[in-house]
Image (spheres, rainbow, N blue to C red):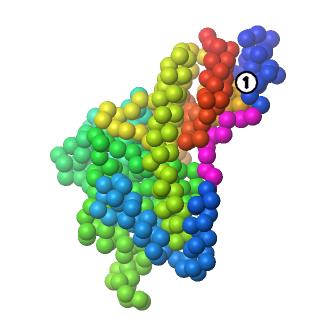
Amino acid sequence: MSTLTAEARPSLSKLASFGGTPVSTKPVPFMSTALTEADINAVNAVLKSGMLRAASKCLEFEQRWAAMTGAKHALTCANGTVALQLAYEPLIKPGDEVLVPAWSYIATVSMVVARGGIPVFVDALPDTMQVDPKDLAHKVTPRTTAIAVTHLYGTPVDIDAVQAVAEKHNLMVIYDAAQAHLATYKGRGLGEFGDAVTYSLYATKNLATGEGGLVTCNDDGLAREISLLRSHGETEKYLHESIGYNYRLNDMAGAIGCSRLDRLPEQTKQRQTNALRYNAIIKKVTGLTPPAVTPGAESVWHLYVVQMDTKRFACTRDEFCNALKAEGVPTAVHYPRSLPQQPALGDFANDDTPVADALATRVFALPMHHDLTDEHFRIVEEALTKVAQAYRV
Ligand SMILES: Cc1ncc(COP(=O)(O)O)c(C=O)c1O
């Protein structure tokens, strides 16, 4: 940590974090998660019906989600973590080596471990921050049976390259799209690719039901297996064909999902417009780099993650973010550690993911949602310029 003072560096005295006047006393909202009257009415209808378990609203939600993402089957479940478990259990065996991203949320990898698989970390690309296909190909061994990678921040990975590695070595592919609702690759929905795709519907996701998850796939047999695993292997009342779990969603969440689906395409377009505005702002600030998108992919910008070249500034990323916060611009760090740096996954770390490890000190996310206004963009631009100038080396 640097210990700069305004005496030692007079340019700091204008910063709100050093007692100066903030760009805005009202913070830019980091996210926009409010329900509409339509969402509330949809839940009320379920409450009035008394049918709270997974029923017609979950079914409607599944059918619409499959159609919107280009998948044959969609299955709702309790959250994005169990969505991964439901996808992994039929496709990965205990002892299998599974290629996983070093740069992602922990669930993508921890559920491989929970399944008894051995995660093998693959580094990230420095510009898109998505999994590096060259390192992926390099890490295949005779024990590798599957690839489990994340479309991180809403940006699809290089799917053609991932599928090419999978085809060459006959590997299963599971895509974690927890952050990538309605993202596309070469104009096609994410549900068209790989053996299974999983989603989270957690409260802050682009599509949110509070808690919730989805798995999509195109194989009838796999869909049946997932459906059985989701509900105690039950084929008719109290007839259990196989061992399973209770990983079901419920119809209140299903109703919120259906209602929010009506607005999701429009909100996604707004996020995409907002990302373009951010790109233009970030390009003007030396030392900051906007996030790159995989060629052929369309990001849905769950998070807009900037990289900071810390050598260009007399402060750490965290000090820079604290200064932005004081100016009225909240930020968040996704993530402060790469996955091999997590104590829980240290046994699998190989010290060979330098890009992911470095991202942990470089990244921060700006407020991103469909409700950003011209005034919000003005505040963000002014605050970024002010903080960058004050800390410039
Ligand atoms: C990439 C990724 N995978 C999986 C999950 C887990 O989803 P959930 O929190 O719904 O269990 C998340 C949630 O943050 C995520 O971002």
Q: Using a 10 Å C-alpha cutoff, classify the residue at mark 1 as few (fewer than 14 neighbours), some (14 to 19) or many (20 or more).
A: many
The residue drawn where x is 59% and y is 41% is 371
The stretch of residues the image draws in magenta is 26-35
Residue 375: x and y in percent read 65, 29
Q: Is mark 1 within 8 Å of ligand 1?
A: no
Q: Quadrant of residue 295?
A: top left
Q: Is residue 111 left or right of residue 219?
A: right
Please tell me which residue lies in front, 198 or 271.
271
Q: Main secondary structure of the magenta part?
A: loop
Instruction: Note whether residue 182 is visible.
Output: yes
User: On screen, 143 above or below 351?
Assistant: below
The residue drawn where x is 36% and y is 75% is 228
Residue 239: x and y in percent read 37, 88
The residue drawn where x is 52% and y is 60% is 259
Q: Is residue 321 left or right of residue 342?
A: right
User: On screen, 232 above or below 8?
Assistant: below
Q: Is residue 160 magenta?
A: no
SS state under label 1: loop
Task: Identify which amino acid the numbered label 1 is placed on.
Answer: Val
